Image: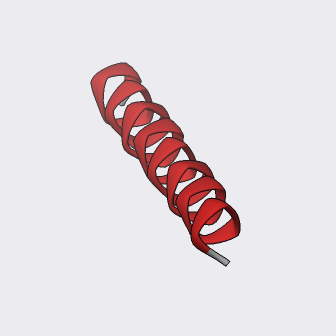
Amino acid sequence: MIWHTWHFGFALGLVVKVVCGGIGIARRTT
């Protein structure tokens, strides 16, 4: 269960990082 929570948190953090990076790139291009 602990490993599952850790993986979920890690995946969630990674998704947030990618989304924030994508928004930053989109803002820079527009």
Image-based side of 28 in relation to 4, left or right: right
Q: Residue 3 placed where, x, y %?
A: 29, 23
Residue under the image location 49 percent in, 35 percent down: 9
Q: Quadrant of residue 25?
A: bottom right
Residue 8: x %, y % from top left: 41, 42
Q: How is the image coloured?
A: secondary structure
Occupied quadrant, residue 30? bottom right
Q: Which residue is depicted at the point 70% across and 66% down? A: 27
In the rendered view, tell whether residue 3 sits above or below residue 24. Answer: above
Left or right placement of residue 12 versus residue 27 in this view:
left
Q: Measuring 51% from the left and 62% from the top, which residue is drawn there? A: 22
| 5 or 11: nearer the viewer | 11
Asked whether 21 or 28 is in front, the reply is: 28
Count all numbered tags in the image, as a single digit: 0
Say if 28 sits above or below 11 in the image: below
- Farthest residue toward the bottom? 30
Q: Position of residue 17 (x, y in %)?
A: 52, 42
> Along the line of sight, which residue is nearer the eye, 16 or 28?
28
Vertical placement of 30 versus 11: above or below? below
Q: Position of residue 4 (x, y in %)?
A: 32, 35
Q: Which residue: 37% across, 43% down?
A: 11
Image quarter hosting the N terminus: top left
Return the residue nearer the eye: 29 or 24.
29
